[in-house]
Image (cartoon, helix red, strand yellow):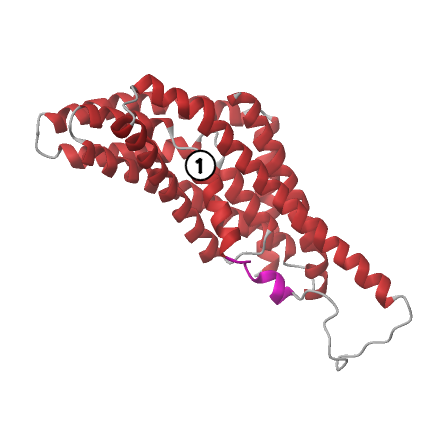
Amino acid sequence: MRRTLLVLGVVLAVSLLILWLSGGFAALQAWILAGQREIQNALASAVRKIKRAQPGALTALLTVCFSYGFLHAAGPGHGKVVIGGFGLGRRVPLLTLSAISLAASLAQAAVAVGFVYTGVALLGWTREQAHGVADAIMAPVGTIAISGVGVWLMWRGLRGLCRQTQRQSHDHSGHVHDEHCGHAHGPTVEDLDNLTGWRDVAALIAGIAMRPCSGALFLLILTWQLGIGLAGVAGVFAMGLGTAIVTVTVAILAVWTREGALASLPGQSIARILPWFEVLAGALVTVIALSLLVQVL
């Protein structure tokens, strides 16, 4: 089983590299953006049907919103970067990371609802003002938060490497240890398997949720103006579920790739190499986040 994971992980990594080098990601992005435009038209049509109280209109809206969320998440975005980087860098159990992915997608929907209803309902923003604040403030702040997650991963990895260096220096200083010496000689695989506290999870979810989807903002403002705000809220959470399908898939692929790369290593070697996974994954998340920040500024 471990050899199978290793082979599949290598095949996945090579396939993604070939796709990127061949320009396949650009073609995929163009196809996804075209699909999003078509769904936006269907979204506006579904909203009009709800306003006219046509039978089945709400079901149609939720279906369109779910599809939009899926396509939006499959395109360029930061949620996949954070979940993928965290899954590669930390040895988090698959079910835990999947639950975090789902929670982050729903939190992103909740942030969109809170933002729109605070701005439009309480402050009287127009649609243009709401989108302007989202683009000028929330998008950069969310992207900076993502880069913060990447820096945090690098810091954890570097701290682990420093501990390893200190431990090796201590072991080489002439001290003799045996299995009954009564103190730990460094982190075990079981220690590294354990997800850190709720603050880590909260930071990860907040980094994703900070930047609401533009389609969600459009739907919430439109339905508020038409007097069918609850339908808009339901639609945004349906978008969140569609987004979660993609982010959970990324979580599965990240865990799959990580475990495939570690499958052939003995336990002590895994403990030594995992800090490098954190450093490299954190660097990747940081670089991608900063590139996204350049685009939104």
What amino acid is labelled 1 in the image? Met
Front-most of residues 241 and 139 = 139
Per the image, the residue denoted by label 1 is: 210
Percent position of residue 81, x then y:
53, 38
Who's the residue at 56% across and 47% down the image? 86
Front-most of residues 272 and 204 = 204
Task: Name above or below for residue 74 compared with residue 205.
Answer: above
Front-most of residues 11 and 109 = 109
Percent position of residue 259, x then y:
59, 55
Percent position of residue 243, x then y:
38, 39
Q: Is residue 177 left or right of residue 121?
A: right
Who's the residue at 66% across and 51% down the image? 156
Task: Name above or below for residue 48 compared with residue 252.
Answer: above
Percent position of residue 178, x then y:
80, 79
Q: Is residue 196 left or right of residue 40?
A: right
Q: Is residue 162 left or right of residue 106?
A: right
